[in-house]
Amino acid sequence: MTDLAPGTFRPRPGPAPVRRMLGAQTAFELRLLVRNGEQLLLALVIPIAALIGLTLVTLVELPAPRVGTVLAGVVTLAVLSTGFTSLAISTAFDRRYAVTKRLIGAGVPRGALLAGKSAAVGCVVAGQVVILGVIGLALGWRPTASAVLALPVILLGAAVFTGLGLLLGGLLKAELVLALANLLWIVQVAFGGVVVPLTTGPDWLAVVGEATPAGALSAALHAVLTDGRAPSAVSLLVLAAWGVAAWAATLQWFKWQ
């Protein structure tokens, strides 16, 4: 029989370090996403299908290079789907089934819960960018040196949509969030320059569209990935304003049950 060191099985009551809680919560959220077919559909299947379909099927006239134009819009679509729609719905049903209430009762800090959900969104968005980028390269996309600017823009966009998703999911009932999150997803896709760049539409649509989070993100990504230039200050300021407003409202009004 192996001798064990004294104190091996001594109880050590007390909360785990916040870093370990955050890692566990992030892994928990990622497992929920992988097991949820609807969220996988929004996060991966639809963006990949849109990237391949809009690049190869030329029914919709798009500025050249076509694959770069499509990629900018599809990355916006992926960040919107993961950071806003999927997160809002999953958060609302977590509240409905008292998941957040039980986690708080188990000693997980509220900040760690929000940070875990945000970190899970960040992991998924990183995976989406890699997958869509590889597919884009296979379809003929050739990034310029300015493409590296897309990373902070995507990070900013993910933060904005995460704040909005937590705000919606943390305020309303699950059934209402389910309908409203999908409706707002359609509105953002329609008016946010996701399929067709805002610069190719009427002036009023460009003004209205770029005032939306999806429109500002797609305009910034079109500048970087399609035109090979830095994003405009207007797009970045609009995104920053939406992000500050969304997170301030989330921290103020988020309901845990």
Image (cartoon, rainbow, N blue to C red):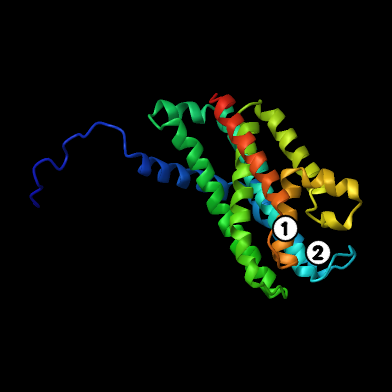
Q: Is residue 170 left or right of residue 223?
A: left
Q: Residue at x 48, y 42 (%)?
A: 116
Which residue position is annotated with label 1?
74
Q: Is residue 22 left or right of residue 139?
A: left
Where disc 1 sits, the SS reads helix
Residue 158 got which mark?
none
Q: Is residue 145 visible?
A: yes
Q: Residue 225: x, y in percent?
A: 70, 65
Which residue position is annotated with label 2?
54
Q: Is residue 72 above or below residue 34?
A: below
Residue contact at pointers 2 and 1, CB within 8 angstroms: yes
2 or 1: tag closer to the N-terminus: 2
Q: Is residue 80 above or below residue 113?
A: below
- The residue closer to the viewer here, 65 or 34, is 65
Q: Residue furthest front?
A: 233
Where disc 2 sits, the SS reads helix
Look at label 2 and name its amino acid: Leu
Instruction: Count residues near mark 1 (Cα–Cα under 10 Å), then give few for <14, some for 14-19, many for 20+.
Output: many
Q: Is residue 59 above or below residue 208?
A: below
Q: Residue 149: x, y in percent?
A: 62, 62
Q: Residue at x 69, y 29 (%)?
A: 175
Q: Residue 234: x, y in percent?
A: 73, 49
